Amino acid sequence: MALILGIESSCDETAVAVIDGAGATLAARIVAQRIASQDEEHRPYGGVVPEIAARAHAETLAPMVGAVLEEAGLTLNDMDAIAATAGPGLIGGVMVGLVTAKALAMAADKPLIAVNHLEGHALSARLAEPALAYPYLLLLASGGHCQILEVRGLGQYRRLATTIDDALGEAFDKTAKILGLGFPGGPAVERMAREGNPKAVPLPRPLMGSAEPHFSFAGLKSAVMRARDAGIHRSEDIAASFQQAAIDCVIDRTRRAVERAHTPASPVTALVVAGGVAANASLRAALTALAQEAGLPLVAPPPKLCTDNAAMIGWAGAERFAAGLTDPLDALARPRWPLDPDAEPVRGAGVKA
Ligand code: KG4
Ligand code: ZN
């Protein structure tokens, strides 16, 4: 039994979980968890306001730790380690979570584990699917990141692809804004797309067919804007056509990465999708077909483990704790923290990692 307290505060969800690293099933592994969304606070601004997010984390987090421990019927002293997201993310929020974790670790004399938020997403599939073994191919698609990584082991990542402009979740969020669907945008676009015709509006598929498996979504977003301005299409048809174009790009790019990374000489065990956009049912269906074509199982955590949560942070902490990897109390909060620091910058890439 390795009990880990997990804390997540890198964007607009405040989340706490108690994880049992020795649990044999997903249900046994998540002892207790809570998530507080800040959607209402950010909605008037149409996006996440970092200052508001940090203040909300500061207000919500400490009482939530108490509530989750109580729900678990455990105390801080029962924990084997305290794990918190230390980046990448909005620095104010990351600092609230990390400093809270440090204080708890000091007070209870427990080790601290500074978790990379992206590693949390990357390992969420192993939390959900106990049989999933390294190495696996991971499509990580969230609001801030769109990458394909070979996950070779704990802390061992090879980046095969990244976006040269917008992340996939960002493209969904911007499309939602263009269509006046509000915030958060991804789920709203998905809902509206169900009522539309995905072939109604001709939209580009940037980088489709190109040799490297990288992504680009900025041109698609501009085309969505032009389609709206034309004033001749139903919003439902624009949403459906956007979603189809985005998914076509993702599938083409992921197929290219599978060809690269899954070879007879060095096979991977599975195709895995994680990050907030992995909650999208149409994307999951398209990836299921691609995995089948490649002769690989598709592992997709339940949607609630795809969007930001503390269970994945606690689980990454549990894997690190089992490997003897803990961090000193002066561990840094990092706004940027790539999983594969050796990856070459991509030509045409903006600031996004
Ligand atoms: O992983 P996540 O919760 O936070 C980040 O670390 O970014 O991902 C949030 C992103 C947002 O862009 C959101 O619009 C998108 O995931 N998202 C979706 C869906 N649910 C969340 N995008 C498309 N379809 C969804 N159902
Ligand atoms: Zn995330």
Image (cartoon, rainbow, N blue to C red):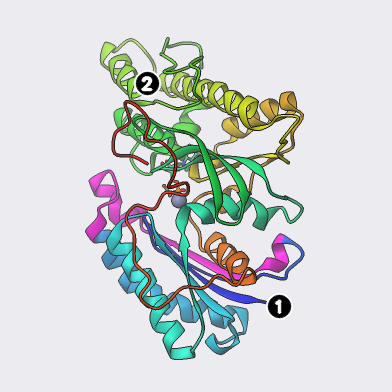
Residue named by callout 1: 1
| Relative vertical location of residue 218 with respect to residue 137 in this rendering, above or below | above
Residue 147 point in image, percent of width and height = 48, 37
253 in magenta: no
In the image, is the residue at mark 1 within 8 Å of ligand 2 by its beta carbon? no
Query: Hey, what amino acid is under mark 1?
Result: Met
Disc ID at residue 49 = none
The earlier-in-sequence mark between 1 and 2 is: 1
Please report the residue visible at 61 percent of the width from the left and 24 percent of the height from the top: 255
- Mark 1 touching mark 2, by CB under 8 A? no
In the image, taking residue 256 as reference, residue 84 lies left or right, namely left
Q: Residues within 10 Å of mark 2 (few under 14, many from 20)?
A: many
- Closer-to-camera residue (17/84): 84
| Relative vertical location of residue 215 with respect to residue 103 in this rendering, above or below | above
Please report the residue visible at 38 percent of the width from the left and 69 percent of the height from the top: 97
- Secondary structure of the residue carrying tag 1 is loop
In the image, taking residue 244 as reference, residue 27 lies left or right, namely right
Q: Nearer the viewer, mark 1 or mark 2?
A: 1
Residue 69 point in image, percent of width and height = 55, 80
Disc ID at residue 220 = 2
Residue 209 point in image, percent of width and height = 51, 14
| Relative vertical location of residue 208 with respect to residue 216 in this rendering, above or below | above
In the image, is the residue at mark 2 within 8 Å of ligand 1 by its beta carbon? no
Q: Quadrant of residue 40?
A: bottom left
Magenta-highlighted residues: 26-51
- The quarter in which the C terminus is drawn is top left
Please report the residue visible at 67 percent of the width from the left and 69 percent of the height from the top: 21
What distance separates the C-alpha of mark 1 from that of mark 2? 48 Å
